[in-house]
Image (cartoon, rainbow, N blue to C red):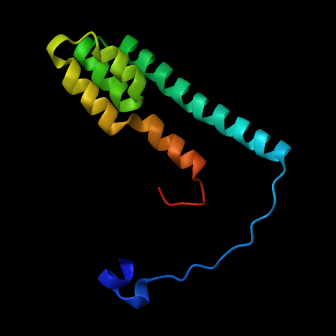
Amino acid sequence: MKKLLFGKEKSHTVIPTKSKKVGLREAVADSAMTMINLCACAVFFIVCGDAISGIFNLDNIGIAVLKSVLEFSSGCASASNCGLYALPITSFSIGFCGLSVALQVRSVTAGRLSI
């Protein structure tokens, strides 16, 4: 599509890289570090959402929206206290996914893919 939209001068050629063989120990160690990084990012944003909502005097809707922007699972859990606004806030939370998911994707794809 890039060649069709912008022409050949804007397109880049892909140079194949040689893949190195990874042993089982290295694969398990890498996956464990990735899980720790992802969980740490989620916990960080959950704690930030709780701290910010504790500092400012927000109602249930404000807390749910704030937590939805930061981390979607805590936003969905907080939306359950919002009565009629629970469904729209939950939909926003799931659709936006929060800053936590954006940074998790960035940490996993760092250097290999553009966010």
**Position in image of residue 81 (x %, y %):** 27, 9
Q: Nearer the viewer, residue 57 or 94?
A: 94
Residue 104 lies, with reference to residue 114, above or below; the image says above
Q: Is residue 66 left or right of residue 24?
A: left
Vertical arrangement, residue 107 with respect to residue 13, above or below? above
* Quarter containing the N terminus: bottom left
Q: Seen in the image, is 95 located left or right of residue 17? A: left
In the rendered view, would you say 95 is above or below 52? below
In the rendered image, the residue lying farthest to the front is: 24
Q: Residue placed at 81% from the left, 54% from the top?
A: 22
Q: Determine the residue positioned at 84% across, 50% down.
A: 23
Q: Residue furthest left?
A: 84
Instruction: Answer left or right for 75 relative to 45.
Output: left
Q: Position of residue 94 (x, y in %)?
A: 33, 32
In the picture provided, is 88 more to the left or to the right than 40? left
Residue at 65 percent of width and 34 percent of height: 35
Give the image location of residue 99, x and y in percent. Answer: 42, 37
Number of numbered discs visible in the structure rendering: 0
Going 49% across and 60% down the picture, which residue do you hit?
Answer: 114
Residue 104 drawn at (x, y percent): 53, 41
Relative vertical location of residue 58 with respect to residue 41 in this rendering, above or below: above
Based on the displayed image, in which of its 4 quarters is residue 58 positioned?
top left
Residue 113: image quadrant is bottom right
